[in-house]
Structures are given as C-alpha cells and as structure tokens.
Amino acid sequence: MQNLGTEKYAVYAVLGGMQGWFLLADIGIASSLQNFISERRAHDQEYGDYIAAAGVFALLMGLFFLLLLSMTVAPIAAAILKGFPFMPATEKTRCFFMVAMVSIGTCVGSIAYRIWYAEQKGYLANILPAAASLISLAGIMAVAKFPNENYLLWSLTAAFLPPAVLPLMVFTRQFMVSFRQRPPMNWVVLRLLIRRGLKFWGFAIMAAGVLQVDYLVMSQFLEPLQIVIYNFATKIYALVFFIYGALLSAIWPVCAEALSRNDWGMVRCYIRKYIVVGITLIFISTVLLVFCMPAMVKILAPHEQITIPVTFILLLGGYQVLRVWTDTFGMALQSMSYLKPFWLYIPFQVILNVLLQWAMVPLLGVYGVVLGLIGSFAATALWVLPLSFYKRMKHNSSGYSLPSGPL
C-alpha cells in the first residue's frame, strides 16, 4: 500500500481477489484425493496409487488451463480492469496473466496440503504457507527498493510466486515417490478420482459464484478508495478466519475416518465444539477490531486517508459468524463426500448473491457487498446444511456404514 498508492493497490486487490477462480484448475482432484486417502487410512490400506494418479491428472489440467488462458487473457483482463483507465491495456494484460498463471501453479501445488491434512500432518500444511508468506514479504520489500516502470507487475510477482513455488516443489516430490512405487498408471484409480473430483469441482465453481464475485462487482462500480477499504477490512478478517479454516481443514480427515467407522457421535461432538470455538474467535476479534482498526490502518497505510467505519466492521463480524456455522456443517458433509445438498441449494445462492450485490453495491458501496453475502447465506446455506447433515445422520446411524468408493 505504501509503495503502490491507492489506485494501483486497488488493482492489486482486484487481481488478488481473482485468485480464487484460478484455484479451480485442479477439477476437484485435491478434495477427492484427500477423502480417498482418509478412507484408505481408516482401513489401514496403502494410497500411493491415488497420489500418483492425481499428480498426472493435475499436471495435464494445469497445462490445459494455461493454454486456454494464453488465448483469452487480453479481453478478460480488459473487462475486469476496465475501472482503472490509468493503466495501459498491455499492462493490464501482463499483470492479469502473471497472477492467473502463478495461481494455477498454486492450485496444483496445494494438493500437497491436502495430502498432509489427510495424513493428519496439518501442522506442515500451515508451516509451509507461513514460510511462503515471509518470502513474499521479503520480495515485496526488495522490489520497493528498486522502483521501475513495471513496479506493479514485479510487486504482484513477489507476492504470488512463493506461495506457488513451495507447494509445487513438495507435491512434485510426493508425486515422484508415489509414481516410482506404483508404475504403471492405475487408470481405474484415476477414473474414481475424477468421478468424485467432478462433484467437488461443481460445488467449488458454485461456491466461487458466492464467495468470489465481490471484487468482480466492485471493479465495475466502485472507486479505488472504496475497494481499498473493503480489502483492508476483509484481509484482516481473513487472517482471523484463516485460523478457523485451518482447524476445519485439520479436522476434515478425522471426521472422514470417523464416518467410515459410522461414528456419528464423534462428528456431532466436533461440530458443536468447533462452532463454539469459531463464534468465540470471531466475537473477540470483532471487539478488538472496533477499538484497534484506526491504529492498524495508520500502520498499514500511514500516508493514505483511509477510514473504516465501525458499522462496517460489525457487519463483517456478523457475516463471519454465519460463515463459521455454514462452513462447519459444510466440512462435515464434504468429509463424507455427500455433495447433493450443495448441488441443490448453491445455484439459488449464486443467483441471489449476484443479484443482491449488483443491485446494492451501486447504492450502498462496500456495505452492499456484505449485505448481499449475508442475504444469500441466510436464505440458503444457514438452514440447508445443518438440515442435510442431521437427515444424513438419521439415515446412516442405524447400522449403515459409508462405502469406501465414491458416493
């Protein structure tokens, strides 16, 4: 923020907000692989053949999407960044392509994290991103000492490249070890991975339609300063929710193994416990941010006139509480690969979310983004997910145990 200024930082924020779309490039293989590993571990079976198959498929998909991106990048960049007329078209294309290319690499590399989570080594899946973030920070500081005409591009590269390279290196090693132990390719395993992965992918695409449209809408209607205000507040909350998300990621394979044993009582206990922990975390964080946000803004942007209203902080806090509730039940359903409820309700949530944001953002600014999200969650996921979980539990807890194959 200090080096780019308000306008270019807004571009940085919008491009960073696009990253979630490119993280769909694995076609759901990462989630599929994690559940298969958990199921194999629950029955003391080997799973190297699944890692090898996932590596081959992820590599092919990454190359395919890079080729597709190279053919379509110019018009997409122009449409998304049309609200920044100070940028030449060539610069928009270069910056967008760089972020997209590196994000696809991050998507493939992040399969390593899912393998670690499935092996209940979640601490590794948190240490590596932390190390990547420190390297990114060092890179951004280094770029700031050598300003040039492509400063925004180099800043984006420094920020997004390390989180892609480190997990890619780890996943390459995991893949090579498994592939050498399990030649030739097991096409039956690959088919099972893809079959289940497509279900996760469809769900992820629809989820992106809910969680990843905010910057798309803001880039069409809001001034750079408004985008920066939204980015600052949500980035700080993202750090808080990252902690809770890490807890959910760590408990996912534990729930998957418990459900493979038909131990629904343990899963219910985890759900109750983690919802209480999550809401408490959000409440404490919101209270602290109400008092500390002005000081934090001065530290992060000492030369900019940025004010984040208390009402916006409270509104974001309320939205995060909704996310704790829905994400916890969503994790439980995904851990059993039961995705039917998501397919039924998310299309309605996507449509409602886009309509609400598109209608309210021009009138209410950044408040319209959060109100659109809250409205879409309250009308759908808030009650659909817990209802689906308890109906599934009632159906399966009478002696039926989950199969190890795809559902």
Image (cartoon, rainbow, N blue to C red):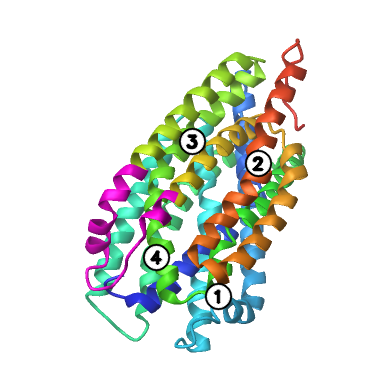
Determine contact: label 4, label 2, CB under 8 Å: no
Q: Position of residue 215 (x, y in %)?
A: 53, 66
Q: The residue under label 1 is which amino acid type?
A: Phe
Vertical position of residue 360 compared to residue 388: above or below: below
Q: Residues within 10 Å of mark 1 (few under 14, many from 20)?
A: some
Which residue is drawn at the image coordinates 42% and 49% (left, top)?
314
**In this view of the protein, which residue sits in the foreground, 262 or 236?**
236
Of the numbered discs in the image, which one, if any, rests on residue 229?
4
Q: Residues within 10 Å of mark 2 (few under 14, many from 20)?
A: many
The quarter of the image holding the N terminus is: bottom left
Determine contact: label 3, label 1, CB under 8 Å: no
Foreground disc of the pair 3, 2 = 2
> In whole angstroms, how far apart are the C-alphas of marks 4 and 1?
14 Å
Q: Residues within 10 Å of mark 4 (few under 14, many from 20)?
A: many
Read off the residue under disc 1: 221
> In whole angstroms, how far apart are the C-alphas of marks 2 and 1?
27 Å
Read off the residue under disc 3: 116
| Whether residue 36 is visible | no
Q: Position of residue 287 (x, y in %)?
A: 33, 43
